Image: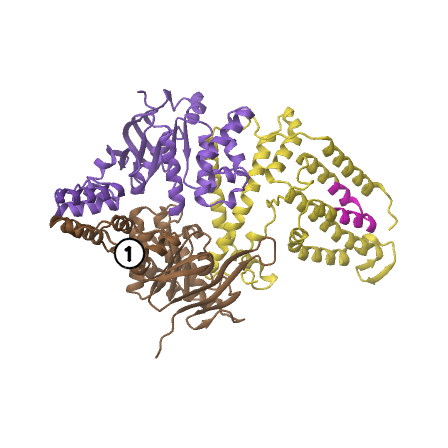
């Protein structure tokens, strides 16, 4: 299977002034495949934001290449195709909405690429449906909560029918209700086949993904399933990252009851393990 | 008022009150055109009767659009201090320009005649009429309709490479952020007041002092605006926005006979107000 | 001498834009009190009136009807000395780093103290103290530029700016919103210390139940503009019926324990911390080792 996004030995530095450069990404390589749900985690300053901006060509590497659907992000002529293929939802809910009512904003991207009106109406309706904001289509943005605004932003990207959507710390400014709403939408979209890449420092969000990439000091330090990643509790702690409560509880229980699995990451799994344990003993 | 800070809620710009009235259902381009020609006519009319007609017309429009007059009045309220100050200044200092008519006061450079009084009254009433008309327009027309109208009416200028869509987009974005900005300003004032900032105290002569007091508001809001602009540009680019590029349009308006009829009526009213020699 | 609560809110109501078409009732006879030195959490959905309530504490809003008494002073009086009130009650808004306006860190923190009319020497002392409380090195950071800071550091600067007023009561609206895990834990640690060691009365609004459990002595649940429930975290989070009724979230640990009780296991749902919750689960497992009769299924 061809990857949607492929990074090959990507290095990137920010220029502070004429003489000083700060190296932010060092020789990063990985691929994102269709249908994946990938979380990129790292503490603030690890390079994860810079990395996410490379995924659709907002930034281009100083060294190395980034390929999106076979196009090189350095090719200026391919910019539009790349941005259509990989859409991005950003952190600040307000700072992505340009129009005065919801449905107009969702249509904005489609107008930009010249989609005919009939097709536009269809796509806007579908996108609003997926994010469950159809009844808000005529509302102005300042009447919406943070979570609702982010869902509108997602609809705006979704309407362009990308192959992959990148969420750049898209829940960090939301309260717990808003975060749940957005995560639900991400889960639904992935179930429908959308490739999702989410950049976050919330471990409970990362636990939702199929694959976690851990970045530190501009380099990939871990790339595996959540279950495998959360086994390395000490290492994660050293990287200033948390481990989900469920994992922590499982580990504590495991230290007393060695048969109890310590590789649990979801609530359901913990409950099931307790049930399994009590049944086993009876037999 | 139990709070010094309730600004954001009194902002009526960008407020759309959907009542489904006849006025609401008119083609927004027609409304915009009619609005412009009426405002021009009112601006040039200096008679009492003419302005009375204009005032009655604007009140009628409120009634026809089924919008409570309280909205219109809350639009006028913040302007009242200006109207009063302007009236006083005009009365005291512009009298010399209106020396014909019956003289009431003649003291030094202050000349108050029946004509200067007319000026003052007519100016105030005109101001109110225009506020009412603008209110009816913005309350009965969603901002999207308005910006589309501006874009549509200006589109012939595309032929001379006038950046019609760009201007329209800038207007849309500006209007879209007015309520957001008002909320942020309110919050900023509260936050700085919580640190001991003092707005609006002291007399007008301490103008430098009072300006300095506003720095804790202006500077952060400016920062917010700048970072907002940066974020917006990035988000727009990621959705393939290209300035000056070809684009399709989500909404379309088609003017019907009734719209043209309304435009005709508006035009006739303007002609009336502009050219009819009202006796008083 | 009988002590009175340092914050007393009685039947407080507030309606925005009263008498206009855009009228909105934000508070409806809300009640709250805080004893000196307590740490109070206010939780509730957006629109439940939390922000409106806390804005009464430092006089940004005056009681429309009902009473607000801060340290013995009735805020419904005509003449309230706002300056002293705002020194006594330090209110930190959400995302306070937005309000930084000075170019130099030290200057921004010094704004509040200067506004109080303090002399340079005293202001310097205050800035130094405030910076040490939030964990910013005075000598290293006081002359640094504000715009070059990270989000977490900016928040420290903003918090220091309020602490420099040396308030008796600290009110925080979602103090950790937007912070990454490390910064969040650091900040919670600092707030805890301010409450326990510096003896500040703390009132904070939060959506994060782990935070509530960590810091609060008592919790108020707001809904529909009024306080619907109050008690210690233990009382609130063990009342399952009320939790459901008011859609109150619980810490992740408590969630797991509740699900186990649903399945018939005997666990205490007031085991908030990870170690306590794990202990509760281990009690269940220990029980099973001795046979099935200890497991009661409904």
* Residue A32 image-quadrant placement: top left
* Residue designated by label 1: C189
- At 12% from the left edge and 48% from the top edge, which residue is drawn? C289
SS category of the residue bearing label 1:
helix
- The percent position of residue B255, horizontal first and vertical second, equals 69, 30
Label 1 resides on the chain identified as: C
* Disc 1 packing (10 Å; few <14; some 14–19; many ≥20): some
- The percent position of residue B145, horizontal first and vertical second, equals 62, 36
- At 79% from the left edge and 59% from the top edge, which residue is drawn? B109
Say which of C224 and C58 sits in front: C224
Dominant SS in magenta: helix
Which chain is displayed in brown in the rendered image? C
Residue C221 shows in this picture: yes
Say which of C54 and B41 sits in front: C54
Residue A114 shows in this picture: no
State how many labels appear: 1
Q: Hey, which residue is sitting farthest bottom in the picture?
A: C1
* Residue A236 image-quadrant placement: top left
Asked if residue B47 lies in the magenta stretch, the reply is: yes
Which chain is displayed in purple in the rendered image? A
- The percent position of residue B100, horizontal first and vertical second, equals 87, 53
Side of A24 relative to A252 (left or right):
right
- The percent position of residue B191, horizontal first and vertical second, equals 46, 56
- At 64% from the left edge and 25% from the top edge, which residue is drawn? B160
Drawn colour of chain B? yellow
Side of A168 relative to B50 (left or right):
left
Question: Start and end of the magenta stretch?
Answer: B38-57
């Amino acid at each position: 299977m061809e990857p949607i996004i492929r990074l090959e030995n990507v290095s990137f530095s920010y220029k502070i002034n004429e003489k000083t450069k700060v190296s932010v990404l060092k020789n990063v390589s990985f691929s994102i495949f269709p249908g994946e749900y990938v979380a990129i985690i790292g503490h603030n300053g690890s390079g994860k934001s810079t990395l996410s901006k490379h995924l659709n060509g907002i930034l281009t590497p100083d060294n190395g290449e980034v390929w999106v659907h076979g196009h090189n992000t350095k090719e200026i002529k391919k910019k539009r195709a790349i941005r259509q293929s990989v859409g991005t939802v950003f952190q600040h809910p307000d700072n992505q909405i340009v129009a005065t009512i919801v449905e107009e904003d969702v249509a904005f991207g489609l107008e930009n690429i010249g989609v005919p009106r009939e097709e536009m109406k269809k796509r806007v309706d579908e996108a609003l449906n997926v994010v469950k904001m159809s009844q808000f289509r005529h509302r102005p943005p300042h009447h919406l909560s943070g979570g609702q605004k982010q869902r509108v932003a997602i609809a705006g990207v979704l309407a362009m029918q990308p192959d992959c959507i990148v969420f750049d710390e898209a829940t960090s400014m939301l309260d717990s209700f808003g975060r749940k709403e957005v995560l639900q939408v991400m889960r639904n979209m992935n179930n429908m086949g959308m490739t999702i890449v989410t950049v976050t420092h919330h471990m409970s969000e990362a636990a939702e993904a199929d694959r976690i990439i851990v970045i530190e000091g501009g380099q990939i330090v871990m790339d595996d399933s959540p279950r495998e990643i959360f086994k390395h509790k000490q290492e994660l702690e050293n990287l200033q990252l948390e481990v989900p409560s469920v994992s922590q509880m499982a580990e504590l229980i495991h230290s007393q009851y060695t048969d109890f699995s310590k590789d649990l990451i979801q609530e359901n799994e913990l409950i099931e393990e307790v049930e399994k344990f009590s049944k086993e003993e009876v037999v | 008022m139990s709070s010094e800070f309730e600004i954001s809620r009194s902002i009526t710009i960008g407020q759309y009150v959907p009542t489904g009235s006849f006025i609401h259902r008119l083609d927004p381009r027609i409304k915009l055109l009619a609005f412009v020609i009426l405002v021009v006519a009112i601006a040039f009319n200096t008679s009492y009767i003419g302005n009375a007609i204009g005032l009655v017309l604007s009140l009628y429009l409120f009634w026809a659009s089924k919008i409570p007059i309280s909205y219109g009045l809350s639009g006028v309220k913040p302007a009242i201090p200006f109207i009063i100050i302007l009236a006083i200044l005009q009365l005291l200092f512009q009298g010399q320009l209106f020396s014909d008519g019956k003289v009431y006061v003649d003291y030094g450079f202050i000349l108050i005649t029946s004509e200067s009084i007319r000026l003052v009254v007519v100016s105030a009433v005109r101001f109110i009429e225009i506020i009412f008309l603008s209110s009816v327009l913005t309350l009965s027309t969603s901002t999207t309709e308005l910006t589309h109208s501006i874009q549509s009416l200006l589109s012939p200028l595309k032929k001379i490479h006038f950046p019609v869509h760009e201007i329209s987009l800038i207007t849309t974005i500006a209007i879209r952020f007015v309520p957001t900005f008002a909320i942020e300003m309110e919050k900023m004032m509260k936050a700085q007041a919580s640190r001991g900032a003092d707005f609006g105290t002291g007399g007008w002569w301490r103008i430098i002092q009072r300006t300095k007091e506003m720095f804790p508001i202006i500077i952060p809001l400016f920062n917010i605006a700048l970072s907002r602009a940066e974020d917006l540009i990035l988000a727009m680019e990621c959705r393939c926005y290209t300035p000056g590029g070809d684009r399709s349009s989500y909404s379309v308006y088609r003017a019907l006979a009734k719209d043209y009829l309304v435009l005709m009526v508006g035009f006739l009213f303007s002609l009336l107000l502009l050219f009819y020699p009202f006796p008083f | 001498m009988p002590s009175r609560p340092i914050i007393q809110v009685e039947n407080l109501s507030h309606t925005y834009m009263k008498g206009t078409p855009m009228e909105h009732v934000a508070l409806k006879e809300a009640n709250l009190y805080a004893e000196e030195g307590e740490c109070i959490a206010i939780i509730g959905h957006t629109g439940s009136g939390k922000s409106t309530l806390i804005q009464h504490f430092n006089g940004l809003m005056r009681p429309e009807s009902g009473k607000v008494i801060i340290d013995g002073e009735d805020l419904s009086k005509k003449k309230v000395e706002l300056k002293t009130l705002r020194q006594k009650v330090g209110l930190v808004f959400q995302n306070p780093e937005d309000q930084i306006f000075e170019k130099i860190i030290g200057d921004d923190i010094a704004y509040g103290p200067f506004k109080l009319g303090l002399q340079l020497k005293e202001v310097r002392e205050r800035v130094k103290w405030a910076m040490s409380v939030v964990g910013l090195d005075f000598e290293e950071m006081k002359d640094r530029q504000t715009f070059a800071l990270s989000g977490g550091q900016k928040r420290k600067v903003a918090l220091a700016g309020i602490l420099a007023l040396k308030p008796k009561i600290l009110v925080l609206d979602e103090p950790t919103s937007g912070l990454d895990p490390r910064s969040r834990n650091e900040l919670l640690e600092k707030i805890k210390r301010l409450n326990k060691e510096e003896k500040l009365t703390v009132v904070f609004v939060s959506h994060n139940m782990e935070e509530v459990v960590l810091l609060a002595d008592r919790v108020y649940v707001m809904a529909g503009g009024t306080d619907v429930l109050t008690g210690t975290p233990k009382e609130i989070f063990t009342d399952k019926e009320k939790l459901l009724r008011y859609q109150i979230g619980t810490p992740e640990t408590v969630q797991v324990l509740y699900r186990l009780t649903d399945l018939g296991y005997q666990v205490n749902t007031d085991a908030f911390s990870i170690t306590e919750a794990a202990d509760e689960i281990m009690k269940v497992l220990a029980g099973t080792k001795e046979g099935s009769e200890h497991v009661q299924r409904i």
